[in-house]
Amino acid sequence: MRSSRKAFTLIELLVVIAIIAILAAILFPVFAQARERARSSSCVSNLKQIALALKMYQQDYDEKMITPGGLPRTTADGSTCDDGQRRPDGAEIVRMMGGGTEYMLRPYIKNSQIFKCPSDTGENLWGRSSTGWPWSNCEWFKTPSSYHFRHVMEMGDNGWGPAHNDQIWVGNSEAGMGRPSSLIVFYEASAFHQEKLPLFGGVHPEGDGSAAIRANPRRTFNASFADGHVKIYRLNHKDPAWNTNHDMNWVLYGTADGGGVAGGSDFKGE
């Protein structure tokens, strides 16, 4: 007797393939979102450890914030690698993001990976990996960080004017913080877990300011506060009318001149 053998028809195979493709299209974004949430949680853990290290640093240095003014100006052989002025400006952001943050907190954090967000793909944000800076040959400028230290925190409890021409600015004191639980100190240099766009640099991440933020209110990033806690912060159109001459460092600060941090309007934790 001849046995009959059944096989899938071409139509049946195509239907199965189509179903698999539809399921993949539905599930892959879900998996990607779950993975990104896990990376964001890891990033929160990093910032918590950095915040704790900063608190320990403050205990050792008269309750002062870290400041690029404390970064070495010479290399191991004694040659000058950075003789520029140290004051709260864009150069200080580059110094800290290019390695200054890790250098200042290294005694309290032994793992360099803590300073790297898992979702940071290495874009050269603020020139943190550039080799053309006057300080590029300094040993401390070799470990780029994912986390932006706000250089307004080195105003030494003064506004911009009183210390503008000082060679080295001291960090803010803990007592000089108006409301430390509401003052952001570190935040992610980019919306790594959302739109992947930078959060600073003189250009609004949406390109045209508050109207675009209202249209796309998802923009969130991890931030640590002066009292040591970490939370997800949501940028919205009230932060405030965007000025393209400034960046997130200042937008998150408010009015500083004459009042220092305590006189600013940067209270974001409430």
Image (tube, grey):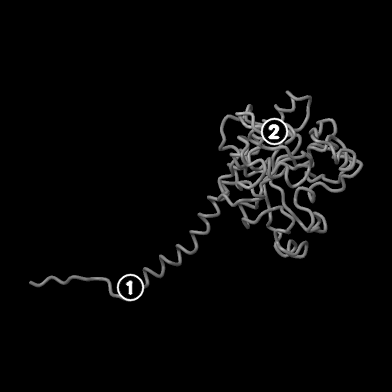
In what element is the residue under mark 2? loop
**Residue at which label 2 appears:** 71
Q: Secondary structure at mark 1?
A: helix
Q: Position of residue 180 (x, y in %)?
A: 80, 36
Q: Is residue 100 left or right of residue 121?
A: right
The crowd level at tag 2 (other Cα within 10 Å; few <14, some 14-19, many 20+) is many
Q: Which residue is found at the position 74% from the left and 28% from the top?
A: 58
Going by the picture, which residue comes out furthest to the right?
258
Q: Foreground: 164 or 219?
A: 164
Residue position marked by numbered label 1 in the rendering:
12
Task: Report, in whole angstroms, how far the alpha carbon at label 1 lies from the one at label 2.
Answer: 68 Å
Q: Is residue 25 above or below residue 263?
A: below
Relative to residue 263, is residue 269 drawn left or right?
Answer: left
Tag nearer the camera, 1 or 2:
2
Residue type at numbered disc 2: Leu
Q: Looking at the image, is mark 1 or mark 2 earlier in the sequence?
A: 1
Please name the amino acid that badge 1 sits on: Glu
Above or below, comparing residue 121 to residue 28 in the picture: above
Point out the image quarter for the N terminus.
Answer: bottom left
Query: Residue placed at 49% from the left, 59% from the top?
Result: 27
**Percent position of residue 95, x then y:** 68, 41
Whether residue 211 is situated above or below residue 251 in the rendered picture:
below
Q: Quadrant of the C terminus?
A: top right
At a point 18% along the width and 70% down the height, the residue shown is 5
- Which quarter of the picture shows residue 112? top right
Mark sitting on residue 229: none
Q: Residue furthest front?
A: 79
Give whichever of 161, 25 is nearer the camera: 161
- Quarter of the figure with residue 4: bottom left
Q: Residue 88, image x and y in percent?
A: 79, 42
